[in-house]
Amino acid sequence: MSLTPHQRNTLIASLLVVGAVLAAILTGCAAPTTPTASPTPAAPSALATPTSPLATPSLTPTTELQPVVVTIGLWLPEELNPYGDGRGAAVLSQQLDNFSEAYPDVQVEVTVKKAHGRGGLLDFLRTARAAAPTVLPDLVVLDAADLETAARSGLIQPLTPFLSGTAAGDRFPFAVSLGAVDGETWGFVVGADMQHLAYRPDLLDSPPLSWTQVISPPVPFVFPAGGHDRQVNDATLIQYLAAGGRLSDDEGRPTLDEEVLAEVLQFYADGASREVISPTFETPAISPTLVLNIHDAAQSWETFRAGQGLIAVVPAGRYWPESDETFAPAPIPTRDGHPFSIARGWVLALVTDDPDRQALAGLLLDWLIAPDHNGEWTQAAGYLPGTLGGLRAWDISNAERAVLRGVMEAAVPPPRPEVMNTAGRVMQEAVEAVLRGRATPSEAARAAAESMGQ
């Protein structure tokens, strides 16, 4: 009879706990060890009474055998701290408590560290592996951007053998990609973020889906165009990739499609070619002054909530916890009207290479990624689930779920940092040149493509 990964993990974990209990019993029954130090001589008795082999046992109470508890180590980033404030922290803390109730012989020991940099999760995994491997956790939640480094450094183990076919097959394509290294699963997405559109349903019957619908008639459009760390924002990157643009050639070298970039920049130029935006949401579709002063999607959402624009690019992580009935979600308008976005997220990875501990860790893994658990936590914490089952568990309308599903099914992982270090910078320069009126879309795209060739 074949067992699923969950059944196998449960069986092995149960046997491990039973074995630990038996070991404790045998240890408790063993004869006491004779002390090495010389005992203090006892005072002589007035009457010596011979000891009978059938004498009544001493009435001194024996030490009660304590249940054996096995500990699972879980390292989390500060952003996922179950002991922090907010609904997400409360839900995760309760789920960990419920796990301990379901498996009373297994205790979860949570350690919270910063996500990145010196003293961060990846840094601690490296240093502990070399200097103090006994303090390593059994499971860790990493930024998906660090997963490949952790895998290639031997800090984590492949996750494929521990995932059921149902869990593996329920993932959105972006979650499969974010958790994979060389085609094998090393991490499972437990929380993701991406950008989509928000619009005002009381002022728009339906949101624009394409560039043409944004421009004619003009629909005031709020999005980050000011750049982040001197690189182009995801809002522009989404437009470029959705239109078929490439960021690397067949050999992996950074590149740009001049023609596609020119189309994106022409959309911006056409949207900005009217008079300055007015409080009544008249023309133009794009206000250069407004969008160039917005540097990330969170700021775009805040600007939109303050009353600017009819549509805006917003982060899912801010929109869903903070939205109300005056807003509605939609895909970001693209050249061809097809949904598209870029996903980033947190992945749960296996650290221990001990088979017995892996079985125990598998129990917690299954618990945390169960669709009802992950769905409840992500909605409370302001993240998107990586599975369709997790999305089904969200308490939202069917229309909202359909919008999210369409965006999530079309989302892709972010480009590699080494590519964006070059392409992101020259694309941002092109965006600013067009919106500030210093170059035409064709001129700015040509200059960007030439910069990539230098």
Image (cartoon, rainbow, N blue to C red):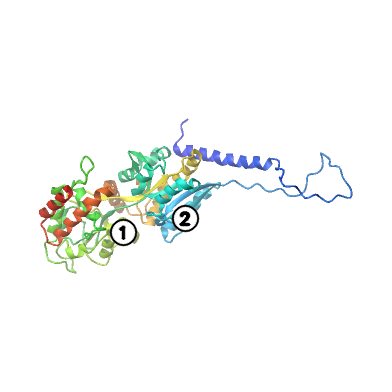
Visible residue check, residue 367: no
- Residue 349's label in the rendered image is none
Q: Which residue is mark 2?
A: 93
Q: Nearer the viewer, residue 255 or 399?
A: 255
Residues under numbered marks 2 and 1 in contact, where contact means CB atoms less than 8 Å apart:
no
Which comes sooner in the sequence, label 2 or label 1?
2
Residue 204 placement: quadrant: bottom left
Left or right, 407 with reference to 127? left
**93 over 354 or under it: above or below:** below
Q: Which residue is mark 1?
A: 319
Point out residue 99 in the picture as x, y percentages from the top left corner.
50, 49
Q: Going by the picture, which residue comes out furthest to the top?
A: 1
Instruction: Say what amino acid the circle numbered 1 marks.
Output: Tyr
Q: Nearer the viewer, residue 385 or 189?
A: 189
Q: CA distance from mark 2 to mark 1?
A: 24 Å
Point out residue 39 in the picture as x, y percentages from the top left corner.
76, 48
Instruction: Say what amino acid the circle numbered 2 marks.
Output: Ser
Point out residue 291 in the picture as x, y percentages from the top left corner.
20, 62
Left or right, 359 with reference to 54? left
Left or right, 235 with reference to 382? left
Visible residue check, residue 241: yes
Q: Give the secondary structure at mark 2.
A: helix
**330 over 162 or under it: above or below:** below
Q: Give the secondary structure at mark 1.
A: helix
Left or right, 302 with reference to 58? left
